[in-house]
Every structure is written in C-alpha cells, then in structure tokens.
Amino acid sequence: MTGSSYIHGAGAEEEARLSLLNDLLNGACLRELAVSPGERILDVGSGLGQLSRALARAAGRPVVGIEQSAAQIAGALARAREAGETGLLELREGDARELPLAPAEWGSFDLAHARFVLEHVQDPERVVAGMVRAVRPGGRVVLCDDDHDLLRLHPEPPGLMAVWAAFVETYRRLGNDPLVGRRLVALLHGAGARPRRATFVFFGACAGDPAFPGFAANLAANLAGAREAIAATGLVGVAEVDRAVEAALAHGRRPDAAIWYAMPWVEGIRPE
C-alpha cells in the first residue's frame, strides 16, 4: 500500500492475508488487464509484487512498482528472489500522491495500474491525476478498488454484517471512502482521462469450489487485522469482532454457503 491510512497493520498475519488475496484474485485481474507484449507498466501500490511480476511476465519487460511500505518492498523482493524473478521488478519506495518518477519518465508509460489503493487515501483525485500524467497520450489507466457495500453472504452468519458495517465505518473515520469503487469512472474523468470501460472483478465462490475456504479465510483475516479499529468505532465490541471472525471461518466449511463480492474495475485513456 502507498500514500495511505491503512488499518490492517504490517505484521506477518497481514502479509499472509495479502499473499492469499493475490492468489485468489490475480488471475481475474490479469484477464481484464489484457497486457500486450512490450507494454511499459507502472504499478502503483505494488505491495508484495505478486501481481507486478505477473504483469511483467505478460509484458516481457520489468514493471516499475511504487510502494510506501519498506516492509512490503522487502517481502516483494524476497518472493521475487525465491521465484528467480528479481529482474521483473523495479521497486521504488514512495507515495502514490507524489509518484517518484524522473522528469523523463512522466508521460512514458503505456499502462498505469492501481488496485486497493484509492480506498486508503484521503485524496484519491490526486493519485489518479498523477497516474494520468505518467502515461503517454493514448496510454491506459486502470483502477480496481472496493465498494464495501457489495458484500453478501448466504446463509448470512449471525452478527457478521454488523461487524462488517463497523469495519466500513473505520474508513470513514480516517477520512477515506469505503465506497470509492463506484466513483472510479468519475475519478478518471476528473483527472483528464477518457473513460472507456467499466466492469466488475468477481471476488467470491461457493461451497464445492476448492478456492471457497480461501475466500472465507480472507474475510476472517480482514476483520481480525482491523480488530481494534473496528471496536474503536463503538458500534460493536471486541468480542463481537472475534465471533464474526470465527463465523466467517465456519462459513467456509458449510456445504451450502456462498460469498458474493465484486470489485469495480475501470479503464481510461489519456487523450492524444
């Protein structure tokens, strides 16, 4: 994450959650991105670098990744070394609101991408404006982010949605927007890009899908990582958060259960 007010912390548990999140989501995101060989790519909020490396493999050239967290950069480099892919990443520590690009790099990228960044900053307009400046005329800007109102579970675990509502409130208390996903097209337009595509990336599954327990585990870890911040809203207590975490894990073991969630995904073009 970069340039952000991030409520989940940066410990080993959160790193494991983010790694699982990448495993569950990257394939769908790559299909939507449809990277062409040779594209020069800027990945804003590159995190552990798993998606950045996949983008680099698709493009056939290194990806420039911007990440605020030194710990995340260290984790990304360790994973890249383990995979023998250090040459796929050019990682820079920096803020999404002040992209650390050299003068000659502005307007040079074919694609600027950000996922799960805008929900964590108080001024997403500034981030998107920088991304539009970073791409060449005709270049693409792709945003994927949360609208936390889209979560549905069935059968609904008792008490879980009340805890989810308190989780959403933690974003507002930081001055961030937990529903920023529905604003992505407007953010592109406001930054001077020409929006041309909007869709959802589905993030969910049902019992019988081998990946389903992973989706339930991600939900549980999301709440557990924000446990103190959720309780600080006063809407629910720590004990209710803990019960919701257990309920989410139990949901992943039910033979009749489903998790429905979707991330808004948009693409715009910098005008010629």
Image (cartoon, rainbow, N blue to C red):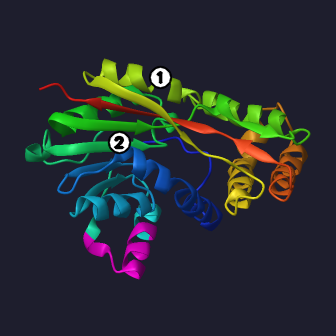
Q: Is residue 78 magenta?
A: yes
- Is residue 1 among what the camera can see? no
Q: Label 1's element?
A: helix
Which region of the structure is painted magenta? 75-87
Q: Check residue 183 in the rendering and tell me which mark sits there, or answer none.
A: 1
Q: Is residue 228 magenta?
A: no
Percent of width and height locating residue 26: 48, 55
Nearest-to-viewer mark from 2 and 1: 1
Q: Main secondary structure of the magenta part?
A: helix
- Is residue 3 among what the camera can see? yes
Judged left or right of residue 92, residue 260 is right
Determine the residue located farthest toward the front in the rendered image: 208
Q: Label 2's element?
A: loop
Within 10 Å of the Cα at label 1, are there few (<14), some (14-19), or many (20+) other Cα atoms?
some
Q: Nearer the viewer, residue 53 or 198?
A: 198
Percent of width and height locating residue 223: 73, 48
In the image, residue 171 sits, relative to residue 224, either above or below, namely above
Q: Residue at x 45, y 62 (%)?
A: 48
Q: Nearer the viewer, residue 237 or 210?
A: 210
Percent of width and height locating residue 56: 29, 61
Residue 216 falls in image quadrant: bottom right
